[in-house]
Amino acid sequence: MASQKIYILGIESSCDDTAAAVLCNGKILSNVVATQEVHKKYGGVVPELASRAHQQNIVPVIHEALDRAGITKKDLTAIAFTRGPGLMGSLLVGTSFAKSMALGLNIPLIDVNHMQAHILAHFIEEEGFDKPEFPFLALTISGGHTQVVKVSNYFEMEVIGQTLDDAVGEAFDKSAKILGLPYPGGPLVDKYAQQGNPKAFQFPKPKVGDLNFSFSGLKTSILYFIQKELKENPDFISQNLEDICASIQHTIINILMDKMKKAVKQTGIRQIAIGGGVSANSGIRKTLKEAEKKYGWKTFIPKFEYTTDNAAMIAIAGHYKYLTGDFADMEVTAKARIKM
Ligand code: KG4
Ligand code: ZN
């Protein structure tokens, strides 16, 4: 077993990225993502269009992943795919493809929970990156999810806090939309925020108990604030874009940090790992790095390409499931909603 090479093909199609990756013994050989541009003009992901684009992309993306890895499908040990959570029409494409490919090659099929995979991305073998030790706390922040998770082992995860309404990514994207920025606005808010004063404007922080979050009130207060300012000065947004973005980002980071401080206090766990598309945010990365000195935490920030939706994280989750022999059977179906 020690000298055996385990080649896992990971397939991700839960939302609007068609992705495939090949891992050998936990190391990346290839990581291919086809991002669907078609949704941009609609200001959000259109499920039917996402599913059609997955159908077009999946074969070339998998070919590319195998080519770049320098292997053929015959070398594969197992196939891992995202079972859920996500958009049903999108998940079905990856699920059906993975099932038929595993059946055709007569190799194990492994179903992966997308949210667990965002966390397990920290276990991809990567030079210069430490892996967290169990137990640790994970903060998963994306366009669809906001969760604080207590991770006791690879597949022993407990959600101890989550959003009651919008996800953090939605808070970024909806705020950006109010400012007239195109979808997805998160990266643009980040870009402008870097030039602005985070204390220029104040937005109220939501009062939500426990380790839960709420972001819908923030969006409303930003909307009212902008509407009021625009009445007095029609050029308010363009004249203050950097300061507005910096202030919004500062508020969101404060909300996240307050809850993480509470989670550390409650669990006694001081290792924090982040994942999901919003963990690409430069302000969040910087604040978490600073927290190492400030609060004595150890923080884990993944490589940029493993934060947004990707198949390398699906493959690494598949790798650990393979080691324990946890395979799916051919009856397995996609699931839009799925628990940790
Ligand atoms: O994980 P992801 O790629 O897809 C989902 O599963 O949702 O996350 C996408 C989200 C979008 O809301 C996008 O605006 C946000 O991540 N995002 C960012 C940044 N980069 C991506 N938000 C803030 N700052 C960024 N740099
Ligand atoms: Zn995701």
Image: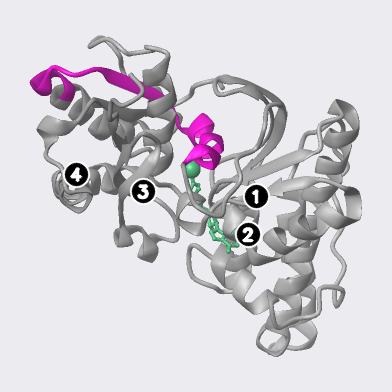
In the rendered image, the vertical position of residue 92 relative to residue 242, given as above or below: above
Q: Is residue 157 above or below residue 286?
A: above
Residue at mark 1: C-beta within 8 A of ligand 1: yes
Q: In the rendered structure, which disc, 3 or 1, sits on the residue that comes first in sequence?
A: 3
Label 1 sits on residue: 168
Q: Are marks 2 and 1 in contact (CB under 8 Å)?
A: yes
Q: Residue 132's mark? A: none
Check disc 1: other Cα within 10 Å, few if <14, some if 14-19, many if 20+: many
Q: Residue furthest front?
A: 3
Where is the N terminus found, in terms of image quarters?
top left
In the picture of the structure, the residue carrying the numbered disc 4 is 62
* Residue interval drawn in magenta: 102-124
Residue 299 belongs to magenta span:
no
Front: mark 2 or 4: 4
Q: Is residue 125 left or right of residue 17?
A: right
Callout 4–callout 1 Cβ contact below 8 Å? no
Q: Position of residue 68 (x, y in %)?
A: 20, 53
Mark 2 and mark 4 residues within 8 Å of each other at the beta carbon: no
Give the image quarter of residue 164. top right
Q: Are marks 3 and 4 in contact (CB under 8 Å)?
A: no
Residue denoted by label 3: 16
Work out whether mark 2 precedes mark 3 in sequence or the reverse, and give the earlier one. Answer: 3
* Residue behind label 2 places its C-beta within 8 angstroms of ligand 1: yes
Is the residue marked 3 within 8 Å of ligand 1, measured from its CB? yes
Residue shown at the point (62%, 62%) measured from the top left: 281
Residue name at image x 71 percent, y 57 percent: 219
Front residue of 80 and 42: 80
